[in-house]
Amino acid sequence: MDEPQHETHDFDVVVIGAGGAGLRAAIEAKARGLRTALVCKSLLGKAHTVMAEGGAAAALGNVWPEDNWQVHFRDTMRGGKMLNNWRMAELHAKEAPDRIYELERWGALFDRTEDGRITQRDFGGHRYARLAHVGDRTGLELIRTLQQRAVGVGIDVFMEVKIVRLLSGADGQVNAAVGYWRPSGEVVVFRAKAFVLATGSLGKSWKYTSNSWESTGDGVAMAAWAGADLIDMEFVQFHPTGMVWPLSVRGILVTEGVRGDGGVLRNSEGERFMFDYIPPMFAAETADSIEEADRWYDDHINNRRPPELLPRDEVARSINSEVKNGRGSPHGGVFLDIASRRSAEYIRRRLPSMYHQFKELAGVDITAEPMEVGPTCHYAMGGVRVDPDTAATTVPGLFAAGEVAAGLHGSNRLGGNSLSDLLVFGRRAGIGASDFAEAQSAEPALDDGALHEAVADVLAPLERSGGESPYDIHHDLQETMQDLVGIIRTESELRQALEELTKLRERAARVSVEGGRAYNPGWNLATDLPAMLTVSTLVATGAVNRKESRGGHTRDDYAGPDPEFGKVNLVQRVSRDGEFTVASEPLPQMPPELATLFEETH
Amino acid sequence: MGDVTMNVWRGDPDGGEFAEYVMPEVEGEVVLDVVHRIQAGPAPDLACRWNCKAGKCGSCSAEINGLPRLMCMTRMDELPPGEPVTVAPMRTFPVIRDLVTDVSFNYTMARQVPPLAPRAPEADGTYRMQQVDVERGQEFRKCIECFMCQNVCHVIRDHEENKAHYAGPRLFIRYMELESHPLDTNDRRELLRERMGIGLCNITKCCTEVCPEHIKITDNAIIPLKERVVDASYDPIAWLGRKILRRGRRSAAEAAEDAPAFRSPTLADEQAPAPASSAGG
């Protein structure tokens, strides 16, 4: 039999994923003079970063001079219910301002203060107005700026390439990535000295999600298959405000900026119900009257924050509870009202894309009437375990940054901390991968056996016939995760989910698709299923093992946090033969000078 | 509710035809929803691009009932009731498959834009810019790169040969954004005239009409660029001033050298193994 010939490219550093983290990593590697490739599933500039709305959190101190990295660090840790990797939170808070100013040097045009500095917006869980932004399309500004920089420095971009597997040498070091061109379906192989995973989220396993088709957990799954440690997989953020109507747009994000800019949540009885859900942890810094909450927008120093701006996990659970108790809106959400609180001109200027989105998709004028909103699957706090300083995974030659990596956000991410995460750790992953690549002398040797196996697996659905449709399996997966591994979880349902996932994996192994290899979305979906099923199993496994409620993991049968679980990460691995193992490991200990930041009461 | 008839173009570079799909009508849907239901049902290999499904990424451009639209922002209930809906790929770009076209032309032109060359920062290392000054550029930076303006531009829609020396409306707003950027020191006017074909645009405003972000492409970008280019070329005092003073700005030749496409033949251009592939940005 003839050996199949595959198009092969050699680089020093290959970055997989071209959202904010991947672009920033590639820019760094290119700046080091390394042969750098950027590989992405969609066209350049379409990655999920483009959808980020509210802003990038950085303690610039432009609006409130009282702000500084220590306050940002403290907010981030408390928002994550102290499960965060302290060192990542420290680096993030310290370096985010430099990364924002760097974007400005590369052409970003952020909204300004009166005196011409970058202005900042209020968001949930941040003590001061901290989010650098451009209206409510900050993600577009960020990805376009990085995209134009990447193009300007001449990075080689491979668009519409889906990577399906990482290959390792005998020493365990990752040395190749196998994928296919979506336009032609032809196999392509990248050999490199270091790889950066920047593949983003995994939310497409849920039915109601703000995530696009790309968020299939490819990076988490490929890292797991390559032997990497994963942590915190049980923590999935359900953003409190997704659209709920019409059904076809259910899940599409409504920015937290609506609340940051004065919007409030009401139930069917017109009550601002968030005042009933202020948890003890945040009671000291949250307003307990409407009057104080409304004064806060103009005077952050003498008033406490409105409860609508509690961290996302708190707000999402509260909305869920209101709907469950029969106080929801007609389509099963609650009301988000900015129309009665701000002028139409202000709303259109501050929230142009929200205005547009509701007008065009729901026929709702948000300057005149309230929006209907409810929780939507939005963000994975968990992912690949990384070294805080270098973004190295536990597998040699493999780095990870952005949403695919875990640690920074602990059990719950604050809004605005994702865009700054991409910049800070995208850069660090670029440095880490470049350092690693420069230290390698030998060109990577390809494991031909593993390559052929990967290619055979990816082509198998095209060669089978009479099997199930990948669309049906994806549909059933989304129903399973939505119903059984959603915002409120319980032991029996999680066990049931794991059984269903086993069946779904068996069904996926028999999937068959019609048509050829050229731009065939059915086949593309079939090749996404192994990763989606792996990450869904990791989430359910973590969730069944964490017997407490914390951040983005709420257990009906274990209400409230458990101090013992508060000291550990759940670390998961997937063995060569597909066995999932889970172990708890103590959190890294914060040094005393940082620990003192949590002693103050307000 | 009843049924809806969708006539969707199916084909590849060798040709194709419209295929009819009769689908149950569902309240509140957009065209992209129906296309997705066709994929999950009668035509699992129907090719289309999409990402955000909220009008923010510009991936799902198509010609719906003959007009360029984003499939994700076109509600079924705004189309004529009871009539079939036709969905075709953008005509100006070569078909890859079904509704997916090879838009690499736009990425090739993007590589030829000399990037921002910022002036020196303030003493504290940052910049001061007034909101009113950044808003000019912000209008153009709203662009979601759906490429529908390129699709309807007569200069390239009906004249493939012009693509070699014409940047098109999407890139003209990029040039105007840089021209009006408060920090920029590059001069791209000669480049616009000589290589980017700004003079070929005859201001029919088709681009402005189709822009889903409502960017005033013609009025706020193309016409001002044309004026600046004319000023730069034919005003002898400006010419003399450039020769003598340079006004801190860099020449067109220097500006062009900043663009990766002019520095060297690109790896991407040499290696491109598939349509729409590997275009370096």
Image (cartoon, helix red, strand yellow):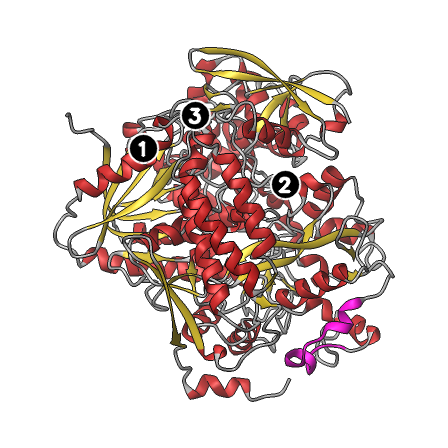
Front tag of 2 and 1: 2
Task: Choose the circle earlier in sequence order: 2 or 1.
Answer: 2
Looking at the rendered structure, whether the residues under marks 3 and 1 are on a common chain is answered as: yes
Q: Is A274 within the magenta? A: yes
Residue A222 percent coordinates (x, y): 34, 50
Residue placed at 54% from the left, 71% from the top? A80
Q: Chain of mark 3?
A: B
Task: Choose the circle earlier in sequence order: 3 or 1.
Answer: 3
Above or below A415: residue A20: above
- Identify the residue position indicated by label 2 in the image: B54
Q: Amino acid at mark 1?
A: Ala
Span of residues in magenta: A273-287
In space, the residues marked 2 and 1 are separated at their CA atoms by 31 Å
Residue B195 circle label: 3
Q: Chain of mark 1?
A: B
Tell me how many marks there are: 3
Q: Is residue B127 visible?
A: no
